Amino acid sequence: MGERLKIGISCYPTLGGSGVVATELGKLLAELGHEIHFITHSMPFRLGKYHKNIFYHEVGVTDYYVFKYPPYDLSLATKLAQVAKMEKLDLLHVHYAVPHAVCALLARQMVGSDLKVVTTLHGTDITVLAQDESLKDLIRYAINESDAVTAVSNDLIQETKRTLDIEKTIDLVYNFVDKRVYYPRDVSGLKKEFVDRGEKLLIHISNFRPVKRVCDVIDIFERVQREIPARLLLVGDGPDLARLMNVVKDKGLSERVTFCGKQDDVAQVISLADAMLLPSEKESFGLVALEAMACGVPTIGSNAGGIPELITHGETGFLAPIGDTEQMAKYAVQLLGDEELYEKVSKACLDRARNEFCNFNIMRQYEEIYYRVLGREARQTSTV
Ligand code: GMT
């Protein structure tokens, strides 16, 4: 048996897929016996109850009156260094180049030991932030100076190299899903509260930002419900919410569209649905589509970014060019109107999610990267 590692994890703890991946990874690593220290400004939302081998260190921010903006990044770097020293951490695994990787590099310098830094790129740090000239050089620096860098899709690796002119090797480690949590739940009782007999339920879950193109979701739904009886469930919250509520009202769809805000039990909510809509402008992977896949719910969406690496068109969902809502609606009608096709696609979804994006396999890929940067032997672990 190889060595138990002491790992510090920093991420955006309160929202988004990157926080989900970081937290679920930490929980899995702890389950295998590694010691995990979350170092974040608030408790990661997926951490939940007490877990053996998991520790939480809150980053406080100094609000001194001369600071126009409280220096969160400096407080995070200091906290990362303090925890690394005090707990004798082997490495920091940070999610997002800005600010987490930059802070981890500063912490590594402060600690002055062999502390290693593994950075995971999740998408918008490259597809949005690295387009900003004021941050580009900093993100390139963070990537080049990390001991290892991972990205959640091949598409994101290529875009990172192109945008930042980077030659460094970036490891591909896909998002994962815990099959003990994400599986088709029996929600037949609850479903009656959302749909009438014979109606199909479409779902979209996101942070309602412009990149998610939630207006396209409504447009697709409008077309679908003209052909088959259907309802739409919109889950989440974000900057576009008020506008979307108006769009739904103006289109006269209020009776058929439910906005239900953020939900904790995502697997249960997804299990209510017959199909997921994900017509994003940018999507480095699309964790929510994987979560749907693991519940046997096919996704219809755009072929943006890394989505085609997750969804094979015609097998585990249907993809069309960004903005082609007419085609996406046609695919939805085809899928939902053909029981045999639906069963086939839904089963393929379950198989692919369980076999190719299994939490244990993906966690092992991260573990191997940790041992590689530390120059240590990977240990033999039992499966979760
Ligand atoms: O999708 C979002 O807006 C949230 C964002 C995040 O910062 O958490 O998600 C990104 O990371 C996820 C986990 O790796 C990926 O599955 C999402 O595709 C990616 N989002 C985008 O690229 C827009």
Image (cartoon, rainbow, N blue to C red):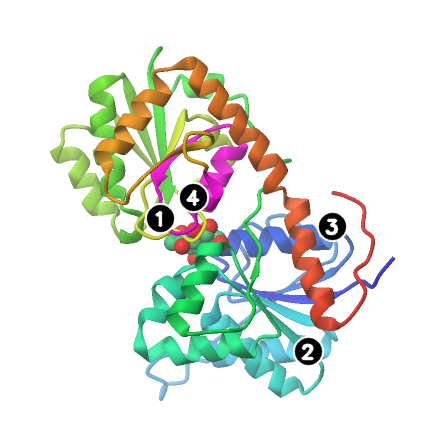
Residue designated by label 1: 304
Q: Is residue 233 left or right of residue 16?
A: left
As measured in the structure, the alpha-carbon distance from the residue carrying label 1 to the one carrying label 2 is 36 Å
Give residue 353's position: percent from left, percent from top.
Answer: 56, 36
Residue designated by label 4: 308
Say which quarter of the image contains residue 148.
bottom right
Which region is colored magenta? 287-311
Residue designated by label 2: 115
Q: Is residue 382 left or right of residue 283?
A: right
As measured in the structure, the alpha-carbon distance from the residue carrying label 3 to the one carrying label 1 is 34 Å
Count all numbered tags in the image, as a single digit. 4
Q: Nearer the viewer, mark 3 or mark 1?
A: 1
Residues tagged 4 and 1 counted as in contact (Cβ below 8 A): no
Q: Nearer the viewer, mark 2 or mark 4?
A: 4
Residue designated by label 3: 31
Residues tagged 2 and 4 counted as in contact (Cβ below 8 A): no
**Mark with earlier residue (1, 2):** 2
**Mark with earlier residue (2, 3):** 3
What amino acid is labelled 3 in the image? Glu
Q: Is residue 326 magenta?
A: no
Residues tagged 3 and 1 counted as in contact (Cβ below 8 A): no
Rendered residue at 52%/62% (across/down): 42
As measured in the structure, the alpha-carbon distance from the residue carrying label 2 to the one carrying label 3 is 23 Å
As measured in the structure, the alpha-carbon distance from the residue carrying label 4 to the one carrying label 1 is 7 Å
Secondary structure type for disc 1 = loop
Q: Nearer the viewer, residue 274 or 379?
A: 379
Callout 4: few (<14), some (14-19), or many (20+) C-alpha neighbours within 10 Å? many
Residues tagged 4 and 3 counted as in contact (Cβ below 8 A): no
Give residue 346's position: percent from left, percent from top.
Answer: 49, 25
Give residue 299's position: percent from left, percent from top.
Answer: 41, 34
